[in-house]
Image: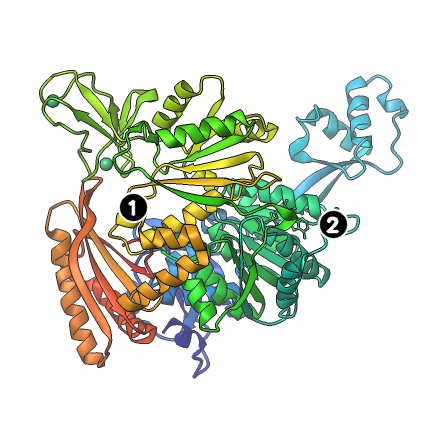
Amino acid sequence: MLRSRLFQRDRPLSDAPILRLALPSPLRRLFDYRAPAGVPRAALQPGVRLRVPFGRREIIGVLVELAETSEVPADKLKPALELLDRQPPLPPTLFKLCLWTAQYYQHSLGDTLSWALPVLLRQGEPAEARQERFWHVAPGASLDDPRLARAPRQRQALATLAQHPHGVAHQLLSQLQLNKDSLDILLDKGLARVEVRRHAPSERHGPLLAQPELPLNPEQRAAFDAVHASFGSFNALLLAGVTGSGKTEVYLQLIRQTLEAGKQALVLIPEINLGPQTLERFSRRFNARIALLHSAVNDRERLDAWLAARDGEADIVIGTRSALFTPLKNPGLIIIDEEHDASYKQQEGLRYHARDLALVRARQENIPILLGSATPSLESLQNAHAGRYGLLRLTQRAGGAKQPRFLRLDVKSLPLDSGISMPLQQAIAQTLAAGQQVLVFLNRRGFAPTLLCHDCGWISQCPRCDARMTLHQRHNELRCHHCGHSQRQPSCCPDCGKVDLRPVGAGTERAEERLAILFPKTPVLRIDRDSTSRKDAMDKLFATIQRGEPCILVGTQMLAKGHHFPRVTLVAILDADGGLFSADFRASERMAQLIVQVAGRAGRAEEPGRVIIQTHLAEHPLLVQLTEQGYFAFAEQALSERRAAGLPPFAHLALLRGEAHKPGQAEDFLDSACAEAELMLAELGLDGVELLGPVPAPMERRAGRYRAQLLLQANARAPLHRLLTPWSQALEQLPGGRAVRWSLDIDPIDL
Ligand code: ADP
Ligand code: ZN
Ligand code: ZN
């Protein structure tokens, strides 16, 4: 709808047009303003930012189109206050991507643009690379100048400047102990000069390759050739390569070709933790300008990197999810590493999937896109089966390392000591005795997921959620992992006053503590969000691991991603059963991906790896398939189950979530929403869209709010989306909507 309006130009517009702006508001509409005083028409290009009054505030909006008339009465129409850009900050291709995104995800365009723009641009900062002052020695100036004979500080300052032939940036003065007053006097005397130029990343220097490329093996070569042959036009390719099969080497060689063709490459990675590691590997390979964009860079750095990418001054852009919206002057290739990773889906606000949008972007920019993973998502595999993606396989580990062997360890009726069975303890002891490292995987932080009173049955229920608080013994705290609520660990039962409080179940803290007792001579290193919250903690841990002495790593899924632990030869998965029991139909897929990814950390060097999976369901068909025949056999089985059950990727989903302070409020709202949808389906004559619910959310109360959801399921995308656009607008008008916080999630990944 927005798009068609944007391009409608049936009659010439007057000199005082009406501006239709996208504002950072959840409302799915545009807002009308008059042009600011004194701004010529020609300056009002779609895409420019304007500062406008909004209620009592001033906010920044983006001009979408000019119009002749407005539904707002002329005397109510306010003038915009200020035009902020001479050129639209967002190039047309990105603007188009934002339009598409807003439409597909049923989100307000203004809010979508806010997600896409760097924070500083949302706040009105100029969308041009910074101008900076650089201090230089003036031509002909000399340290022997008689005017400096009795001014040692000025002489010293001039000497320092002389050591920097490219000048000293003003902001570095104090770092170089350059005194501003001395420089000002030098300037007056004509001995120093100031140059104002843009703050651009350094020029590329030397040959592009800083390090020789590895000769590709035949599978890598075939994958490389397939992507290379697609350069210059849209093509989607899925690189399914086992961990350590050399996917990254293929990326690097394709990026080289991209850069040599004068184009830029965009590389998305799932985790900010992988940023530095990826950056290091890329900068070892290339003399190139690399921009790193993730949530930990500050706003200024983010804007600088964004502008450099837009203006063609960055060759490679590496970033997490939101980097997908980085404009590129000469895009050549998009790579999505670990394409199956759930972190590509944003779970708040604009609930976009960066991988799915990257495909749209590649199509719009007419460039190839490569999705890589050892454990492709069922969606991507199905796209490959259906011929929409080319499928490239790397089946062997590069460099000769062997695939790990899997063992399902049936722990039914075995005693578990802090989650660790006796046979597993023996395997750990054996591995350590052989001088090797062990990785123990447990996807649960803290000491124990529950604290229980053995006398009266009290449990550590979160007061704000339908969930239990986790015991974090090291901090003497109970913490809720769902709402962040925390309280001191009670010394006696809050209900009966007795002191027999017992931790139930095991988290990483408990496993760590127990392993340290069982193996007192071996270092036990815990890696999870609690242990690595400090920036350097992770680096220190990895340095210890890389030294290669026997040790035990205990950690959550942070361990599963990307890292290489060549000396780890035993991987123990303490609990695989959650993924087989869960009500969420994606749980088994996630479990399989996690197991294979964790397993992939092991035995990368000469020694083959072993993976022991503790389970109560040792004969579960999916687990058997996964461990005996590998991920692809598992995926085929899982896909056929999904097909039979009519679930994604064979169906399309949208989820309307609601939450409210009072029980029943959200359900009431969803009930009206459901009635509205039924009405619309009938009016529009749409078939094949099913409404399921409303039902209480899997965790009904969370952070003090009662939650419910309504699922829309369709066997084809078209009817679903034909319903969604009018429906989402109708939802804004529904009575009861004020008391209910609601959101619409298109292609939800957690139900
Ligand atoms: P992936 O990205 O699939 O996990 P990597 O690209 O990181 O795999 O490769 C795993 C290891 O194998 C790395 O140490 C890499 O240097 C090495 N490697 C990759 N390709 C080759 C090759 N063609 N010949 C020799 N070693 C290779
Ligand atoms: Zn009690
Ligand atoms: Zn809670």
**For the residue marked with disc 1, what is the amino acid?**
Leu
Residue at (32%, 74%) from the top-left corner?
716
Check residue 204 in the rendering and tell me which mark sits there, or answer none.
2
Residue 261's place in the image compared with 623, above or below, is: below
Cβ of disc 1 within 8 Å of ligand 3? no
**For the residue marked with disc 2, what is the amino acid?**
Arg
Q: Quadrant of residue 65?
A: bottom left
Q: Quadrant of ligand 2?
A: top left
Q: Position of residue 526 (x, y in %)?
A: 44, 28
- Which residue is at the front of the view, 468 or 361? 468
Residue lying furthest bottom: 10
Q: Position of residue 748 (x, y in %)?
A: 32, 58
Q: Quadrant of residue 608?
A: top right
- Which residue is at the front of the view, 416 or 619? 619
* Quadrant (top left, top right, bottom left, bottom right) of the C terminus: bottom left
Check residue 617 in the rendering and tell me which mark sits there, or answer none.
1
Classify mark 2: residues with Cα within 10 Å, few (<14), some (14-19) or many (20+). some
